[in-house]
Image (cartoon, rainbow, N blue to C red):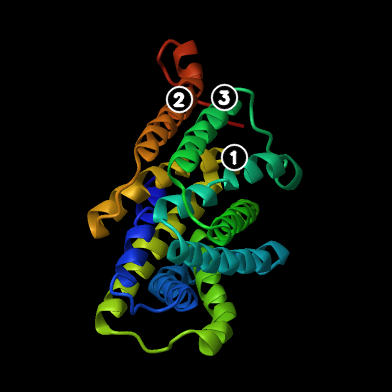
């Protein structure tokens, strides 16, 4: 949930960077955001590696395997597509279409992760998707290209989520640094060809805030969450992001969300509340069964 709240600052920061009409292009923003986030988190990852290495018989759990390499590619493509969508259309429209990723996660999790959504989760998904549909139909008025780019970012967001879940036995900090620095390397050639290497002091400050607060920290939290929570539940919880994006964008640059966004956001929050209450009741059932007393496990 905290990762989603910090992520929701993305639209406002991208709009602020391009507010004066002289900001860098999407590729440049994506490159610097990934690079700054990776460098910021690198000391945390190195500290974890040192601890693992110093223990007898331990080894680094670096995610250098097919899922890890795919993670970098999906992360890079998703980053560029989402930033590009924000420069082509309203922030609310971009984030809403990115969250069609939930459909892909629910559909592909049984195949890729062997994690099947329960019947109790499906009504929550349906309610949340109705909320997104209300926002899209009522407020997204843009060209076909912008919608297509935002929709594609949702596909790669879903693939990224499932790859991180596959890497849940690896160090979360290592995954986050690998994704950010790896995507920066992949984006660098395109940035040198089409982007602009030099930026103003104002833009540089906003890029640092974006890289650290909006990108680096929340992706680390996201990786930690995916160690413990199934991917399809994560996809539901993080849908608080499209609710908050138009709020921060309005406060930052005065981009007014339509009434449909407010209505749809309320529906999404209701779905999140149902998910949290349902999970809490299921987790607390064994506790109630034993009369409120925790039963210790027998020792071997």
Image coordinates of residue 214 in percent, x first then y, are 36, 61
Secondary element at image label 1: helix
Can you say whether 116 is above or below 152 in the image?
A: above
| Of callouts 2 and 3, the N-terminal one | 3
Q: Which residue is mark 2?
A: 274
Front residue of 120/133: it is: 133
Total numbered badges shown on the rendered structure: 3
Question: Badge 2 local density, few (<14 within 10 Å), some, or many (20+)?
Answer: some
Do tag 1 and tag 2 residues touch (Cβ < 8 Å)?
no
Can you say whether 209 is above or below 106 in the image?
A: below
Q: Which mark is residue 232?
A: 1
Secondary element at image label 3: helix
Say which residue appears at 54% left-offset and 35% top-offset. Answer: 129
- Quadrant into which the N terminus falls: top left
User: How much space separates mark 1 and mark 2, taking CA atoms?
Assistant: 15 Å
Front residue of 61/129: it is: 129
Q: Which residue is mark 3?
A: 123
Front residue of 134/102: it is: 134
Secondary element at image label 2: helix
State which mark lies toward you, 3 or 1: 3
| Of callouts 1 and 2, the N-terminal one | 1
Image coordinates of residue 120 in percent, x first then y, are 58, 23
Q: Which mark is residue 170?
A: none
Occupied quadrant, residue 293 = top left
State which mark lies toward you, 2 or 3: 3
Question: Badge 1 local density, few (<14 within 10 Å), some, or many (20+)?
Answer: many
User: How much space separates mark 3 and mark 1, taking CA atoms?
Assistant: 13 Å
Say which residue appears at 33% left-offset and 46% top-offset. Answer: 257
| Of callouts 3 and 1, the N-terminal one | 3
């Amino acid at each position: 949930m905290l990762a989603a709240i910090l992520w929701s600052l993305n639209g406002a920061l991208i709009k602020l960077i391009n507010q004066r009409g002289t900001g860098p292009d999407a590729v440049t923003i994506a490159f610097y955001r990934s690079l700054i986030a990776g460098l910021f988190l690198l000391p945390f990852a190195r500290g974890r590696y040192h601890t693992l290495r110093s223990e007898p018989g331990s080894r680094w759990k670096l995610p250098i395997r097919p899922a890890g390499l795919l993670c970098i590619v999906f992360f890079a493509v998703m980053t560029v597509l989402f930033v590009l969508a924000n420069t082509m259309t309203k922030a609310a429209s971009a984030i809403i279409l990115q969250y069609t990723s939930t459909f892909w996660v629910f559909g592909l999790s049984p195949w890729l992760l062997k994690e099947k959504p329960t019947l109790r989760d499906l009504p929550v998904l349906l309610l949340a998707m109705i909320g997104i549909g209300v926002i899209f139909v009522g407020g997204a008025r843009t060209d076909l290209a912008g919608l297509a780019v935002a929709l594609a970012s949702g596909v790669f967001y879903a693939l990224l989520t499932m790859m991180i879940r596959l890497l849940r036995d690896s160090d979360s900090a290592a995954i986050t640094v690998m994704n950010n620095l790896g995507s920066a390397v992949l984006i660098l050639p395109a940035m040198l060809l089409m982007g602009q290497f030099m930026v103003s002091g104002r833009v540089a400050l906003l890029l640092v805030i974006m890289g650290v607060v909006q990108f680096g920290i929340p992706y680390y939290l996201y990786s930690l969450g995916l160690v413990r929570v199934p991917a399809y539940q994560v996809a539901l919880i993080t849908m608080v992001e499209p609710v908050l994006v138009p709020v921060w964008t309005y406060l930052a640059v005065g981009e007014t969300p339509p009434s449909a966004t407010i209505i749809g956001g309320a529906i999404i929050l209701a779905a999140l509340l149902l998910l949290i209450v349902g999970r809490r009741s299921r987790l607390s059932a064994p506790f109630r069964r034993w009369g409120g007393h925790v039963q210790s496990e027998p020792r071997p």
